[in-house]
Image (tube, helix red, strand yellow):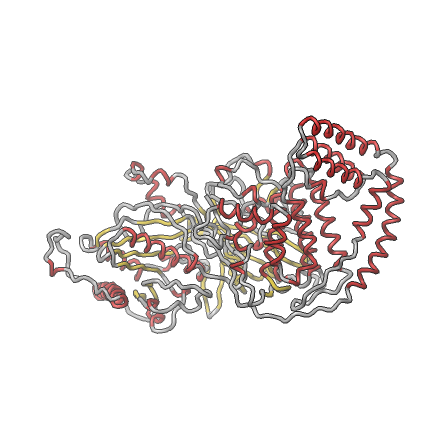
Amino acid sequence: MAGAGTYTNANRPKDWWVYWDRGQCSYKRKITDYLNKIAENIRKEYGLPLNDASREFSCIFKNKVSAEAPVNCKRKPDGVVLDRSKVSTDPAWADVHAVMELKSSFHPWAYKWAYKQLLKDARMVFDAQQNRRFVLGIILNGDDRMAFFVFDRAGVLSSERFNVIDEPEKLIRVVAGLLFAENIDLGYDPTIYHRDGERFILFKQVEYKIKEVIYAESSVRGRGTNCFLVEHEGEDAVIKDSWVDDSRNTFEHEIMKKITGVGGVAKIVDHETVQVRGVNDTTATDRRALSENEHWKTQRNWYFFGTLETREHRRIMMKPYGKPLEDFQTLTELLTSVKDIIQTIEDLINNRVLHRDISLRNLVLAKEDPKDPNSRRRGYIIDFDFAIETDEQDKECAKGRRTGTLPFMALEMMVKEEENKIKHAYYHDLESILYVLCWICTAQEGPNNLRRSRDFIFKESAIAQWAGYGKNDPTMQDIRNAKQSMVAKAENFDKYIVSQFAPYFQPLHKCIKDMRTLLVFTGSKDPKEVEANRKIIKLCLKHDIEVSLSVLSTIPLANRDSKAVFKSLHDVIDKTLEELATIEEPPSNAVPTHNETQDTDELASDQIGRKNMRVLEEENTFKREMEKVEGENAEEANAKKKNLEKIAETVEEADEGVEDETQIASGTAHEAGEKAQDGSQAASECAFALTAFEWTDDGPSLPSDSIQSGAHSSATLFVSGSPTPTSRKRPSEEDEPDTSVPCPPKRVRLN
């Protein structure tokens, strides 16, 4: 490049500018070499030292994937900023300071494609470096058009594109900033650092050694949650590091303090707002220039700026430390933990709190008493960042769009947030538990997070469509339609979901089917039918009698008694647990047999129903008659419905004297249960055999910035001049980093 001087693109001599060689590799090499030449001149001018810690531009990834890159990740940035000591080695994403994309074309599509790739580069850096607050990037478009980007947890900031020939001082500012600025200015968090080969984190001004990174979110926009295992007062504790939307009415630590006495919820030790250079760390820092810029308030893009969230960097320390739910050791432990979690949701409702983000990553196993080595592991619910007090539902919670974790969202919640007129309710959290169970049974071959056999491709499974696989750029409605088609009807649920469960989970088939019947409403909303069934349920609850699923499922979820729903779920799970107790735990490499013996609870309900209120008989009559009503003319239908109302009335009359009959029936049920148990033990002697397979297929992983718009603001760190707001796009799937665990570890925000 020759000096630009006073020349412009229009009047400079033809031989004044030497265009880059169009050879793919040599083109990138020439650009990075030229930028390094600028840095060399700066060093000479100011007497700056050159050592292994000095930074330089490199195109080392032009022909190879970064070391330690996630499986199947094809992302290869055109250029990066590395320490000189790393350039001659085999660098990884953890070594990258900044990223760069180079496109030789001036065409608008080339710039958009470069931005899309740069966004993916930023995601990879966030994923590999848990101490990044933001990531810097460059796009060089054509031969001389450059733009500077800052990716943080509220979105992306962009400078205006400038001509490096006409405005060489801006080019020099970019080079000098990226190669000579302090690490804090490159986006590093000074409170997380390395020393003597170990990592440490500061919390409340106390240094804690990081024993393990439990979880790292690789999204760009969003909470960017990282969880670190540390030791506090001789016990394992977890420090949760995240970027919280500061427009929320109630924050996570406030919710957790309110529910301190609820079982199955982690206990908060302390919390803090992270500070950098003596001030609270927030995404508003780099946006302040734009918000105070009168010029941009008159521009078209200013319309978007006021709707964007500001995220503040916060930490919470919690106990106890738990393992993922997928690490269950037996079917009994899995199902017992699910029952624990259902009980916790009920207790939260009693404390007027909704979790609103039940997902695989937010359910863990931990000892009830961490100090007792013989204490059983129970199910815990973690991550209350989206939790809300039920009294606050009518208030705006936060500017940041969030709807939960996509594959596990309840069907009613799978709409655009601004279009959703249905309030989040307890049964939406329960429905999410159903989807978590389905995911585990499909993604795992057995306990201890054992992967499926090599002949099963998870991405081609029906349940993978819940995470957006199988369709390019799926919308929320596309995914909702796919899920609804699979779960709304019992026959489709069997065909598409249950049929793909690993053989190990066969003893859970009936339990999961019953949960679907209970939690996915597909019945009639006829008010008379609903009212008649509600009377039956009321009496069942009064006398502690099991409510038939066929009756409860006919009532819309919003109209059901929550006690009846929770009781029915517990009954369904208890039946399966009793059945599992009578059979041998199926090995993970074997085809388990299913105990077809009638359950003792089922017999007890049948006995009680016949001996006191004849609930089951009246209910079945009611259902059969309702089916006959359909298709008949209106006059006959009305006449029969009046008769059906009388049936419900007879149920109420049977209430008198029911207590004595209940005691007699309970004794009969106990005798029947003993006989059923003998049959269960005989069935448990069946043999199991199936060859064990090695897991090789990779599961899905979606960024929380999928299918949404990003933030807009100014890049004022190294480039002078007015910034240009920009929008974020959804990365394509081919470059997504897959994880070893077949579940989406990220939260998805959808418009």
* Relative image position of residue 223 (x, y in whole percent): 48, 50
User: Dividing the image into 4 quarters, which one contains the N terminus?
Assistant: bottom left
Q: Residue at x 48, y 65 (%)?
A: 199
* Relative image position of residue 579 (x, y in whole percent): 76, 57
User: Dividing the image into 4 quarters, which one contains the C terminus?
Assistant: top left
Is residue 597 visible in the rendered structure shown here?
A: yes
**Left or right side of 673 for 523:** left
**Left or right side of 303 for 399:** right
Marker count (numbered): 0
**Left or right side of 568 for 118:** left
Please determine whether, in this image, residue 374 is positioned above or below residue 662. Answer: below
Please determine whether, in this image, residue 247 is positioned above or below residue 106. Answer: above
Q: Residue at x 61, y 50 (%)?
A: 492
* Relative image position of residue 671 (x, y in whole percent): 88, 53
Is residue 47 visible in the rendered structure shown here?
A: no
Q: Residue at x 59, y 36 (%)?
A: 391
- Of residue 597 and residue 714, the one placed in the foreground of this image is 597
